[in-house]
Amino acid sequence: MMTLDRSIKINNNINNNVNCRNLDYNEIGEICKDLITDYVDIDPNDIDLNSNLIFDLGIDSFSLVAIIASIEDYFRIKINTVDLLSFSTVNDAIKYIYNKIN
């Protein structure tokens, strides 16, 4: 699970309307890993970008919806259902977010 310090940082970013437009690919990846660890009992450093969200990380449908909501809140984007269905790996989500905010 996410550490308290990381959780506070993420929540502060959401609440303070942080500009995500200047984030690079790696920064987006680290943020996504942190958001995922709110819902999966795994260290963010153990999440590989090619990890399958369902089979490798064990994310169920309820957790996936919550993770997507957190991503939408953090990055201030909307992920439509059709695009969501194309996410199979962590990297798929990162690419989508990167393209959406840049």
Image: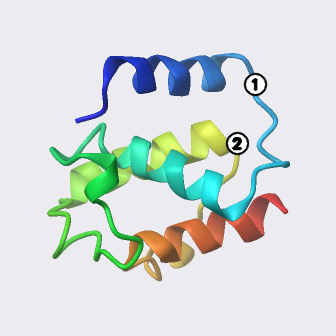
Res 81 seen here? no
The amino acid type found where label 1 is placed reads: Asn
| Residue lying at 57% horizontally and 66% vertically, measured from the top left | 94
Residue under label 2: 76
- Determine the secondary structure under disc 2: loop
Compared to 20, does 47 lie above or below?
below
The amino acid type found where label 2 is placed reads: Arg
Q: Is residue 22 left or right of residue 85?
A: right
Res 49 seen here? yes
Coordinates of residue 15 in the picture (x, y in percent): 64, 17
Q: Residues within 10 Å of mark 2 (few under 14, many from 20)?
A: some
Coordinates of residue 71 in the picture (x, y in percent): 53, 47
- Determine the secondary structure under disc 1: loop
Q: Earlier in the sequence, mark 2 or mark 1?
A: 1
Label annotation for residue 17? 1
| Residue lying at 54% horizontally and 58% vertically, measured from the top left | 29
Compared to 71, does 14 lie above or below?
above
